[in-house]
Amino acid sequence: MAMVRRVEAPPERKPLEGCHSSVVFSDDRQWTEHLVAFVRGGLENGEQVKYVVDATAPERVMRALTDAGIDAVDAVTRGQLSVTAAPQPHRADAGFDQDAMIGSWHDAAEGARASGYQGLRAIGEMSWGARDSIGADRLLEYELRLHHELFPQLPLQVRCFYDRRLMSDAYVSVLASAHLTHLGEPHSVPALRVAPLTDRPGLLLSGSAGYDTRDAVAAAAAVVSGVAAPQVELDLSALRHLDAASLAVLADAAAVRPGGTPLKVRKAPSPLRRLLQLFPELDSAVEVVDR
Amino acid sequence: MTTHELASADPGHAAFYHPALFYGTEDEYLDGVGTFVRDALEREHPVLVAVPGPRLPLLQDVVAGDRDRVRWVDMRQAGRNPGRILSMLQEFADRAGDAPVQASIVGEPIWVGRTPEEAAEATRHEALINLAFTGRPVSILCPYDTALPKDVLAQAHRTHPVVGDSRAYRASSRYADPHEVCSDCDTPLPEPQDALVLPFGERELTFARDEADRCAAAAGMAPARRTDWLLAVSEAISNSVRHGGGRGTLRMWRTGGELVAEIRDQGLLTDPLKGRRRPDPRAASGGRGLWIMHQLCDLVEIRATAQGLVLRLHMALE
């Protein structure tokens, strides 16, 4: 009898595009269009829908939906729709507890499924981050963590609303770029873009990393050290430059990963390879593949 | 003890010993350097010989069967930028260990053919040796060809506590405080004829990096050199923002077969040894950026004055 070698199937990872989108707008008309389309789709698809307001009054959201022909009051009464203020963990004075926030999204998505819905759709107004001076690095870290810790496992779609009237261009460009899908107005490209990888745990870094982009590098490093996956990768195929400080921060993050597995770096730009020649002691934390 | 014995790696010299050996002929060179190396080997000291490549086989013949006990380095390569030599010497001495093991080094940082700009930075390096190794059991013999320009030879008398030739050594009557020598090296730099000028602050760092890369590409710089150029310029402009008053001015121009980047800011180089010892790559301070510049560039000219800091980074196109 022939022996059949059993091959373990890779863990399923659902497509992430569209699960977590940035929506950039600069007037009420655009806001209404994005709001109505997303909520209507969710209600019609049998999903639970949450709108987490920050700068907008809940009544205004309800009115905009009603004016668009959606029976928002009935949806709220049935429990399919909720329009509520951001929970405490969003607030800087509450410590901006990322773990609590991610935990609450997890509970909400599981709760929607347990209640018989197809899943959960959510809109979050992101203006609170800019106002509460939490820091773009920590917000970027939060946006990146959402990708790795929520969407692969849960029936969840989130639209992050960025209102240009309430946030700086620099803030919008860094944070909106951290999403796999972008809707609405175009935004400027940040000096260093950090975004999740679509097919495996890891990040895409593109642009140029230096002292001016240290916040984005710090956010990427926080994700590298925190992702609970056996292996985490960086795709640097679109990275033009990386300075020594940025490499050191990423190497430090890799060094404290559980299990001590090195950070895999794909398509490393020549500056990174040169720095590893100068500092071979970083080789144990950063493994350059396909040199 | 005779005056000649001062030139040998005498175990009695448990402290720092830094003589200049002036030679006029190959025989004088081999006699003076050969004696130093042989004595060091006899006393089982770790020995580093860093001299211009063509000299290496001559000296290797002198020590014959003991050549494998010596670390041989072509100074034309390792010390092309004089600013990186001291890091190499300190690394060697560190590996040799502390007392009672004494490291013996031959370092020839200036040879006939060095440009005046290189010779000036090599003189700064010679002065800094005295600061870096004070109190350490290290002997560093520095050969000087008497065919070198007179001003270079005069500086050797200021940077070496002991001077002599293959026959005798004496204390240098012209030895000067290393800080004073470094200050004297901070002479005005000639103005470039046609430079690209980029004032920068933190917001302009990415643009400045990209402009530096474009400049190198337009000049036809070889890819590997272009990488080194970009890394060096990036470290310099970041230092200006971090330590040099928050902003600076980057100027770039081509001269002959090289590109030059000048970074000017309000920084003060309070520690002249900054960047001349291999840093911990993970440490944000400690001269990591300047050390990288020294390692990658063909020449780093430094002008540290009360008005600010000027760095000129030279990079050959090939």
Image (cartoon, coloured by chain):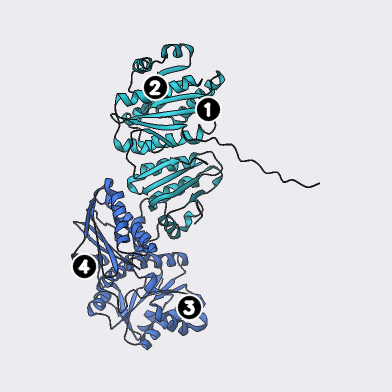
Q: Colour of chain A?
A: cyan
Q: Nearer the viewer, mark 3 or mark 1?
A: 1
Amino acid type of the residue that numbered disc 4 sits on in the rendered structure? Asp
> Does A259 sit above or below residue B100?
above
When asked about the image quadrant of residue B51, the answer is: bottom left
Q: CA distance from mark 1 to mark 4?
A: 71 Å
Whole-percent x, y for residue A164 in the image:
30, 31
In the drawing, what numbered circle is on residue A36? 2
At label 1, counting other C-alpha atoms closer than 10 Å, the crowd grade (few under 14, some 14-19, many 20 or more) is: many
Amino acid beneath label 2: Val
Real-space CA distance between mark 3 and mark 2, rounded to the nearest whole angstrom: 85 Å
User: On residue B184, which mark appears?
Assistant: 4
A261 horizontally vs A220: left or right? right
Identified at 38% across, 77% down, the residue is B52
Question: In the image shown, does B93 or A246 lie closer to the viewer?
Answer: A246
Q: Quadrant of residue A215?
A: top left
- Figure chain in blue: B
